[in-house]
Image (spheres, rainbow, N blue to C red):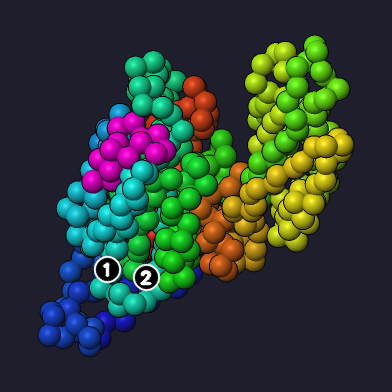
Amino acid sequence: MIRMLCQTTVDCGLQIADCGFFFVRSPRKNRAKRAKYITVAPFQSAIRNPQSAIEIMFNLLNHYTARRESILKSIRELVERETKTREEPQLNEIAGFVAGQLREIGAQVELIPQLGYGAHLRARFNFDHDPAERCVLVVGHLDTVWPVGTLDRLPFRITPEGHAHGPGIFDMKSGVAIAVESLRTIVSQRMATKRPVTLLLTCDEEIGSKTSRLLVEGEAKNAATALVLEPPITGGVVKTGRKGVGTFTVRALGRAAHAGLDPGKGVNAIVELANQTLRLAALNDYERGITVSVGLIEGGSALNVVPAEASAKVDVRFWTLDDGERVVGAIRGLRPATPGARLEVTGGINRPPMPRSEENVALYKHARTLAAELGFDLKDEVVGGGSDGNFIAALGVPTLDGLGVDGAGAHAEHEHIIIDDIPRRAALLTRLMQTA
């Protein structure tokens, strides 16, 4: 048995024999006994002169810097596959494309088709661990908000400022690309991991994970920790907490009548909905972080007809499940304000809150230590938007979100990433896959 002392500054939880940078590989017949035969792979120091944690991270950084253009090419290949949610052929194609890349590096890949949506992709890497062992779950999505054809107007392009633009590049084609690249590096360089790794890429996150929620929650039940590839807050800030999200449709039903001849015989559904809009607005409590936003309204059939129907789409955000349930009760308890009118309310909570829990903070602190060895301070915040991380964290799994490439403009025409951040973010993600 060879015994060594690690000189890194990070308590990553790995034994020396399991460390990707001091990788002991015995002949197969003696593997269980950790015999004295060794091989040292790239990134790994000779045993007589172990690297510091900073040297390890900068070797990874140099590796990804050398591969930056190749990674950028991979990002472009994903961006130029337009994949708006519910575009089934396009989402099937991109899932197959990424699946091929993952199979090439030894993943056990499964495509899970969803009629009318596309395919979810699940890739497992056991890395010599027991497949039943709890894993590091890496989660992302392949769908975007951009209609097919947007590339004709907003093509992939690189600016003199060092930005790469394109629909879906920030949210979140670049995150998918660095995840595949990180796994490729771990495999090709024979870097050991603390746990198995599962990569899950869904096809419907942008519309609330309608077909993927049960899949995400099922994988989370076997996860020790979760890394979410959503874009960071501009500046590279990761997310340790997210608000819960609810969506509702409030439908007012009145009675049609001629607006000029018999207005008194009608019941104006738009007037009723206007009253309910004010009641909904009164539910806002900004100090508690509760927001209730009436975002879309439609109603009426013609200018000279008292409208018989009107409806509103309502977005609800909250920090705690108790607050969310209280607001849900208030919305479902709405009663008509106009004589003769009726109300129909549908919807509910579709993402539970992701609290900034002690477990999430501990995972963030580990990531911050790794980032410091790359020479930058990794900051965190809590945000109002939801992601699949909400589902995972609600099951008690330590979750760190916002691990994609830095940039700005999610869902906006100026959407872009910062090219120079690609190596740094890939290095951080690789080490988190190894040690989380």
Task: Report the magenta residues as a range.
Answer: 81-96
> Disc 2, disc 1: CB below 8 Å?
yes
Q: Which residue is mark 2?
A: 195
Q: Residue 403: x and y, percent?
A: 48, 48
Query: Considering depth in this image, is 120 or 421 the residue closer to the camera?
Result: 120
Q: Residue at x 80, y 47 (%)?
A: 334
Is residue 249 in view?
yes
Asked if the stretch drawn in magenta spans residue 396, the answer is: no
How many badges with numbers are in the image? 2
Asked if the stretch drawn in magenta spans residue 91, the answer is: yes
Q: Residue 40: x and y, percent?
A: 21, 65
Q: Amino acid at mark 1?
A: Phe
Within 10 Å of the Cα at label 2, are there few (<14), some (14-19), or many (20+) other Cα atoms?
Answer: many
The answer to which quarter of the image holds residue 276 is: top right
Left-right relation of 40 to 180: left
Within 10 Å of the Cα at label 1, are there few (<14), some (14-19), or many (20+) other Cα atoms?
Answer: some
Q: Residue 293: x and y, percent?
A: 72, 37
Q: Secondary structure at mark 2?
A: loop
Q: Residue at x 86, y 22 (%)?
A: 264
Left-right relation of 346 to 160: right
Q: Amino acid at mark 2?
A: Arg
Q: If the image is split into quadrants, where does the N terminus sit?
A: bottom left
